């Protein structure tokens, strides 16, 4: 396969991964941010302290969701649905629509993390651009001196020996 075609496929894959990460992050932010706000507001209006505990657990679920999205580690998306189940058990709420959606987001996040880790191992990782790769090669070549230049500098050092007496 041509390098440009491979980079093009990898570039599309990383854009797709970023799109999934953004969707999952927005889901966690909207759902659990609203949940945290509602529970804290209800607690201040005279609700029980279980609502405040539920707000802390929702904050933990939000943190686990964001950790799975932005740290690319699989432990966070595994923990997030179980934290949501703990919230449902403590808040004594029925099985809500949020819990299965959180399980679906966790599965998608784990699959996307797997693809992202594979993309990290590929050549030209963050940009997948042939021109950028060529620029990196050219910049590394500028740092390498020609053998004649190296030998000339060594002779020049040996002749002067660090002194300028000849002048």
Image (spheres, helix red, strand yellow):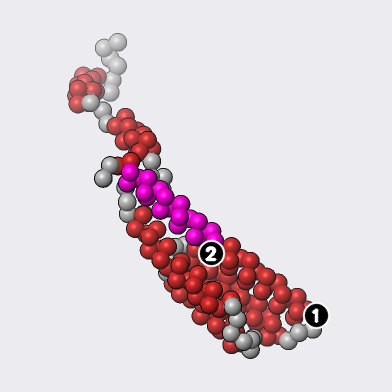
- Disc 1, disc 2: CB below 8 Å? no
From which residue to which does the magenta span run? 5-24
Name the one closer to the observer, 142 or 98. 98
Q: Which residue is mark 1?
A: 45
- First in sequence: mark 1 or mark 2? 2
Q: Which residue is mark 2?
A: 24
- Is 33 placed left or right of 141 in the picture? right
Q: Is residue 72 above or below residue 99?
A: above
Residue 88 image point, x, y percent: 60, 84
- Is 83 placed left or right of 118 in the picture? right
Q: Residue at x 32, y 51 (%)?
A: 122
Q: Is residue 77 above or below residue 137?
A: below
Q: Main secondary structure of the magenta part?
A: helix
Q: Can you tell which quarter of the image residue 27 is in?
A: bottom right
Residue lying furthest right? 45
> On the rendered image, what quadrant is the N terminus found in?
top left
Is residue 123 visible in the rendered image? The answer is yes
């Amino acid at each position: 396969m041509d390098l440009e075609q491979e980079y093009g496929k990898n570039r599309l894959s990383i854009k797709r991964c970023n799109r999934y990460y953004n969707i999952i992050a927005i889901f966690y932010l909207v759902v659990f941010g609203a949940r945290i706000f509602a529970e804290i507001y209800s607690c201040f209006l005279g609700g029980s302290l279980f609502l405040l505990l539920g707000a802390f657990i929702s904050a933990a679920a939000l943190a686990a969701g964001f950790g799975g999205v932005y740290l690319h580690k699989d432990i966070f998306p595994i923990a997030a649905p179980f934290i949501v189940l703990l919230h449902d058990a403590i808040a004594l709420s029925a099985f809500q629509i949020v819990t299965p959606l959180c399980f679906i987001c966790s599965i998608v996040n784990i699959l996307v993390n797997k693809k992202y880790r594979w993309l990290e191992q590929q050549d030209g990782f963050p940009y997948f651009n042939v021109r950028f790769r060529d620029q990196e090669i050219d910049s590394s070549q500028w740092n390498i001196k020609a053998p004649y230049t190296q030998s000339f500098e060594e002779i020049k050092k040996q002749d002067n020996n660090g002194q300028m007496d000849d002048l």
